[in-house]
Image: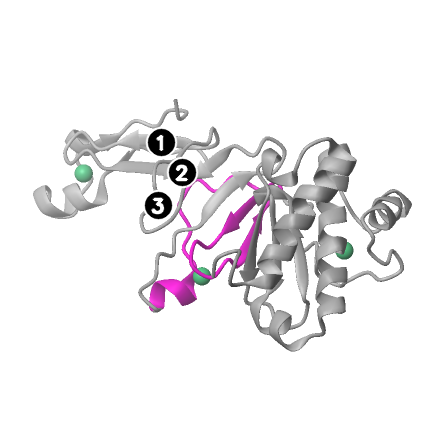
């Protein structure tokens, strides 16, 4: 739905612009924040600092009164502004002052609306918007299972919380790894890239090539030389 046909999205985007301008000197959008829906059932809103996203439960935004939806949007915007100011957010006194300035009721806090605020990396499904927190940089691409099963683009877009740096672009394809963790090697036979979180202790060779050309036995020709990603 476009901004014109979806009044809730329209309201969220306008508040992100106005409150951002008032409290940060520029719209939240100018700092990379976006708005979307998620599939949550229990909570209405969520703020995802790592992916700079504010989301509302699609199901619950439909059911609830307008005033409650608006209060939730203001609540999540207060988290976003709080995060932009100090690089963290929770429901403490500092946040409450921002919430008041945003016109959100500061006494109301929502369970689970900051599910991955402390995660170093966050992944977002390109189709359903579900988010996953990572505490270690994922050296392999991750997929949203439900969307993969449904035949939708399912590779998570993964970003580093502090810098906003994209680790995995995600979408229909995983896209190239743009992180700095782990080790990678490419097979001298087939050219496939293999990535590991830790440097393997023993020599390793490409499984597919050994299977095809060496009856499944270790073959020096397909040895993988692991290096830090460039
Ligand atoms: Zn909250
Ligand atoms: Zn999904
Ligand atoms: Zn190979």
At which x and y percent is residue 31? 61, 34
- Image region (quadrant) for ligand 1: bottom right
Q: Residue at x 35, y 34 (%)?
A: 202
Q: Residue at x 46, y 36 (%)?
A: 167
Of labels 3 and 2, earlier in sequence is 3
Q: Is residue 127 magenta?
A: yes
Query: 159 or 3: nearer the eye?
Result: 3
Identify the residue under disc 1: 184
Identify the residue under disc 2: 196
Of circles 3 and 2, which is in front?
3
Identify the residue under disc 3: 174
**Dot 1: what SS?**
strand
**Dot 2: what SS?**
strand
Q: Are marks 2 and 1 in contact (CB under 8 Å)?
A: yes
The residue at the far left in this view is: 213
The answer to whether residue 116 shows anywhere in this view is no
User: In the visual, does 196 lie left or right of 160?
Assistant: left
Query: 199 or 98: nearer the eye?
Result: 98
């Amino acid at each position: 739905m476009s901004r014109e046909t979806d009044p809730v999205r329209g309201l969220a985007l306008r508040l992100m612009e106005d409150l951002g301008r008032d409290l940060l000197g520029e719209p939240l959008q100018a700092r990379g924040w976006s708005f979307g829906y998620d599939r949550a059932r229990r909570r209405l809103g969520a703020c995802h600092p790592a992916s700079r996203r504010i989301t509302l439960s699609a199901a619950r935004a439909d059911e609830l009164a307008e005033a409650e939806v608006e209060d939730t949007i203001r609540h999540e915007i207060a988290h976003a502004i709080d995060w932009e100011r100090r690089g963290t957010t929770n429901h403490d006194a500092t946040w409450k002052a921002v919430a008041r300035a945003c016109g959100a009721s500061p006494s109301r806090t929502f369970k689970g609306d900051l599910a991955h605020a402390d995660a170093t990396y966050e992944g977002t499904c390109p189709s359903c918007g579900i988010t996953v927190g990572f505490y270690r940089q994922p050296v392999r691409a991750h997929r949203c299972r439900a969307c993969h099963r449904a035949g939708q683009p399912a590779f998570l877009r993964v970003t580093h919380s502090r810098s906003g740096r994209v680790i995995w672009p995600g979408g229909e394809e995983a896209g190239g790894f743009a992180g700095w963790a782990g080790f990678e090697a490419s097979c001298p036979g087939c050219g496939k890239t293999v990535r590991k979180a830790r440097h393997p202790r023993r020599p390793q060779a490409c499984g597919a090539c050994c299977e095809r050309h060496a009856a499944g036995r270790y073959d020096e020709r397909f040895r993988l030389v692991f290096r830090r990603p460039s």
